Image: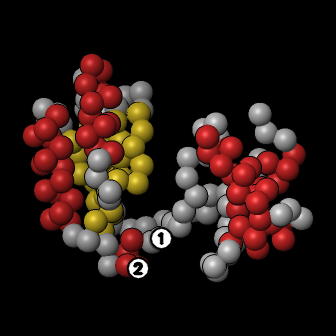
Amino acid sequence: MMDALDKKLLNGIQSGFPVCARPYAVIGERLGMEEAEVLSRLQRLKDTGIIRRIGGNFGPENLGYFSTLCAARVPEDKVDFFAEVVNRYPGVTHNYIRENDWNVWFTFIEPSREIIARNLEEIAEETGVADILNLPATHVFKIRAKFSV
């Protein structure tokens, strides 16, 4: 369960994350908390599954990388295995299920489109799932996602 300070912390770390040697001390100072308390609260929120990770969000195109959205038609009995295989690739940033014939969606970010295509071939070969759409980004629309807790 989250208390008011947990919510304040989650609201406070979503943007403007300090890039410095001790970012959690800076966050604590902003929120009237000690660095140790910030760290322990974030660890508890991670341990309980409220947050998955804290990390940067970079625009791949600004780093010379390419991104693509993929959709796969995966038989229900293979969904877990398929997701496990996809998640092994460090370039996968999201992987989720939708209620649709194209039921598993994921994003890939890699240094080239060729690497993405090769990875998708490997995934298809290992999982036996041949129906994988590769929908490369042609124009990026960046929407700032900030959720008030």
- Percent across and percent down for residue 143 are 57, 62
Q: Nearer the viewer, residue 8 or 68?
A: 8
Q: Which residue lies furthest to the front in this view?
A: 36
Q: Name the residue under label 1.
A: 58
Q: Can residue 11 be seen in this view?
A: no
Are dots 2 and 1 in contact, CB under 8 Å? yes
- Percent across and percent down for residue 114 are 15, 65
For marks 2 and 1, give the CA distance.
8 Å
In this picture, residue 57 sits left or right of residue 37: left
Amino acid at the residue labelled 2: Asn
Q: Which of 39 and 89 is in front in this view?
A: 39
Q: Can residue 66 be seen in this view?
A: yes
Secondary structure at badge 2 equals: helix
On screen, 83 above or below 29? Answer: above
On screen, 55 above or below 125? Answer: below
Q: Which residue is drawn at 28% across and 65% down?
A: 110
- Percent across and percent down for residue 50 are 64, 40
Q: How crowded is mark 2: few (under 14 residues within 10 Å), some or many (20 or more)?
A: few
Q: Name the residue under label 2.
A: 62
Amino acid at the residue labelled 1: Phe
- Percent across and percent down for residue 18 are 67, 75
In this picture, residue 113 sits left or right of residue 25: left
Secondary structure at badge 1 equals: loop
